[in-house]
Image: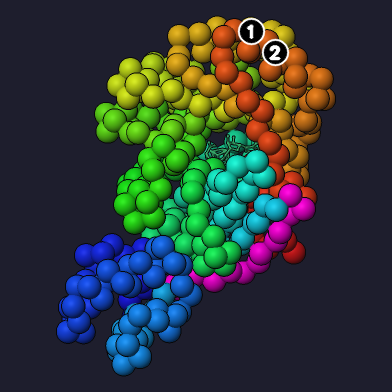
Amino acid sequence: MKILSGLSLKEIEEITDALGATKFRARQIHNWIYLKSVKEIDEMTDLSIKFREELKQVATVTDIKIKVKQVSSDGTIKYLLEFPDGECVETVLMRFDNRANLTACVSSQVGCAVNCTFCATGKRGFIRNLSYREIIEQVLTIQRDTGLKVTNVVFMGQGEPLLNLDNVLKAMEIFNENFQIGARRLTLSTSGIVPQIRKLADLDMQSTLALSLHAPNSEIRRKLMPIENKYNMDELHKALKYYVEKTGRRITIEYLLIKDLNDTVESAKQLAAYLKDIKCNINMIPYNPTEKNDYQRPSNNAIMKFKYLMEHSGKKVTIRLERGADIDAACGQLRGKVEA
Ligand code: SAH
Ligand code: SF4
């Protein structure tokens, strides 16, 4: 049985060819899958009933299941999706009232090997990579369920996308070509896998690269992110410069703010010095509580003060709005399992 979701036009043509149908049928099926987000072959109403029956013998729309769906008071929707092998990941749909954008936050791996101390996903360890089909199925599932068209995709769910780069790049290509989502509306977020950042630079990636820096110096970063032992902030700095030079693109620096740990005036000064010669915007993420650690979210005053200091250094700074915290859908709260 073929799964239609995730197939390219050419791959769908192979199916219609085998059924003795024209290439035009393949185009119709492709539209039903990617632009109209149908759940069943029977909804493809411009195909004859006879042809739909033949198609149903060899293909189905999807093999993914929505295991749990939670809707937050702010409109954020979190899905726990199950793949045929029983593994699950979370996918989040965020709407921002003041914009027409619908942003899907997708997972790239089941679990994550990077094991940052503040992140719920890391606590599970690494289970497996997602295929490119499983990545794009997350967006299709959202579209099928809501009847809405996703306009932006961020790789900020579970997993480290740069450690599953081939599948992630292929998924981005499909978002671009089949979903007609522009490259600039796709964002990759990474914990800082240096060789892969260089690779993206060489590929001249036109999507947004977001780096989870989270610390103003190596000592603090090592406490938060064990990856600092493998690729330290010096190497990272060089790779970021290389990326900006090669692509001409501005990087987004993600900076998790944790009370008394990296939110001090001294930290702001060090961070400003580190980023001085890197073309970037800063996105500050006040820490969202997860179980089993002692970190705390800074006071609003401390957050605003840090923002002011960074702005003073000449950077554009935004504070990430917390979405869906009441359903544990905010950054770092994705676990990928049903709570017992
Ligand atoms: N693995 C990638 C992408 C997924 S995480 C990465 O780390 O960049 C998306 C963002 O959420 C990252 O910036 C991550 O550091 C942040 N995050 C993780 N745990 C968090 C928490 N408890 N509170 C706020 N942000 C968190
Ligand atoms: Fe992995 Fe990102 Fe979580 Fe770190 S923050 S453990 S890299 S998902």
Q: Residue under circle 2?
A: 308
Can residue 199 be seen by looking at this rendering? no
Q: Are marks 2 and 1 in contact (CB under 8 Å)?
A: yes
Task: Note whether 163 is above or below 143 in the view shown.
Answer: above
Can residue 78 be seen by looking at this rendering? yes
Quarter, ligand 1: top right
Q: How many marks?
A: 2
Q: What element carries label 1?
A: helix
- Magenta stretch: give its range: 62-74
Mark 2–mark 1 Cα distance, whole angstroms, equals 6 Å
Q: What element carries label 2?
A: helix
- Please state which of residues 128 and 21 is positioned toward the viewer in this rendering: 21
- Asked if the beta carbon under badge 2 is closer than 8 A to the nearest atom of ligand 1, the reply is no
Task: Note whether 140 is above or below 23 in the view shown.
Answer: above
* Residue type, numbered disc 1: His
Q: Residue at x 43, y 84 (%)?
A: 42
* Residue type, numbered disc 2: Tyr
Q: Residue under circle 1?
A: 312
Q: Quadrant of the C terminus?
A: bottom right
Q: Which residue is drawn at 40% across and 63% down?
A: 34
